Image: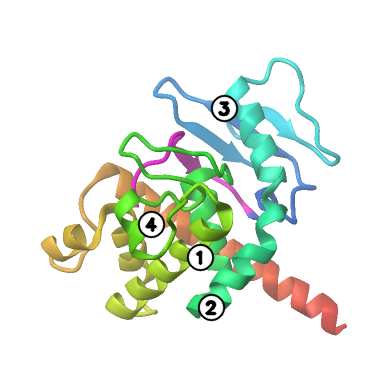
Amino acid sequence: MTSQAVSWVLVLALGAVAPLCRADIYAYTDSSGTTHFSNVPDDRRYKLIVRAPIETPAGVPADARRAAAWLTRSGDYDAAIARAAGAANVQAELVRAVIVVESGFNPRAISRRGAIGLMQLLPATARRYGAFNAFDPEQNIRAGAHYLADLITRYGKDRLELVLAAYNAGENAVDRYGGHIPPYKETRAYVPNVLRMYRALLVQSAGAAAGTDS
């Protein structure tokens, strides 16, 4: 919906999301204040922030250490995500992917434009979907999931790139640009980041299901 309190430009692969927090996660914060995450430290600026069990070495920037803590706590929201996704009839993996990119699982995140909580809801959107306390994870996730469901109804389940562009920039922006992703730097980065995370989570879920069946 909007940029979050810390811009999460995620180069995350599957290992960066709970319950896969056992994989090593590296992070660095660039000169613009953007925090980058990866499980493949292909830049010398990356510092290890999470190892199984959780390890945050000395010298890691404070914001990266906080990010590590938020990511490792992401499993606390599994039940809320499952309930919200089921009620809204959207995939839990999509809801989780949005949360990862929007807030890095920081329930107290506030963006420069006033978007709040895990799914970074603007106050008007939060109220529209019944989240009168948008800092409450249960309300926030439920409202965000229903907003995603309405956007899927509007643009189609096969046009997730537009769904996510509208979530980030607003429906009016997508419509104003003729049903295309608006040419905003933030939105152009946001959409592929969420899609990359969503696809990784789908692979994770398929693998977990296969393990259960075997």
3 vs 1, front mark: 1
Labelled pair 1, 2 in contact (Cβ < 8 Å): yes
Place of residue 144 in the rendered image (x, y in percent of width and height, measured from the top left):
44, 62
Q: Amino acid at mark 2?
A: Ala
Sooner in the amino-acid sequence: mark 3 or mark 4: 3
Give residue 28's mark: 3
Determine whether the residue tagged by mark 1 lies in a helix, strand or loop. Answer: helix
Q: Per the image, is 3 magenta? A: yes
Q: Per the image, is 100 magenta? A: no
Residue on which the image places disc 1:
142
Place of residue 149 in the rendered image (x, y in percent of width and height, measured from the top left):
41, 74
Image: magenta residue range: 1-13
Asked if 22 appears above or below 5 in the picture, the reply is below
Sooner in the amino-acid sequence: mark 2 or mark 4: 2
Sooner in the amino-acid sequence: mark 1 or mark 4: 4
Could one spot residue 45 in this view of the protein?
A: no
Give residue 87's mark: 2
Sooner in the amino-acid sequence: mark 3 or mark 1: 3
Residue on which the image places disc 4:
126
What whole-number distance in Å separates the C-alpha atoms at marks 2 and 4? 16 Å
Labelled pair 3, 4 in contact (Cβ < 8 Å): no
Determine whether the residue tagged by mark 2 lies in a helix, strand or loop. Answer: helix
Labelled pair 3, 2 in contact (Cβ < 8 Å): no
Point out the residue furthest to the bottom here.
213
Asked if 213 appears above or below 175 in the picture, the reply is below
Query: Which residue is at the front of the view, 176 or 170?
Result: 170
Determine whether the residue tagged by mark 3 lies in a helix, strand or loop. Answer: strand
Could one spot residue 148 in this view of the protein?
A: yes
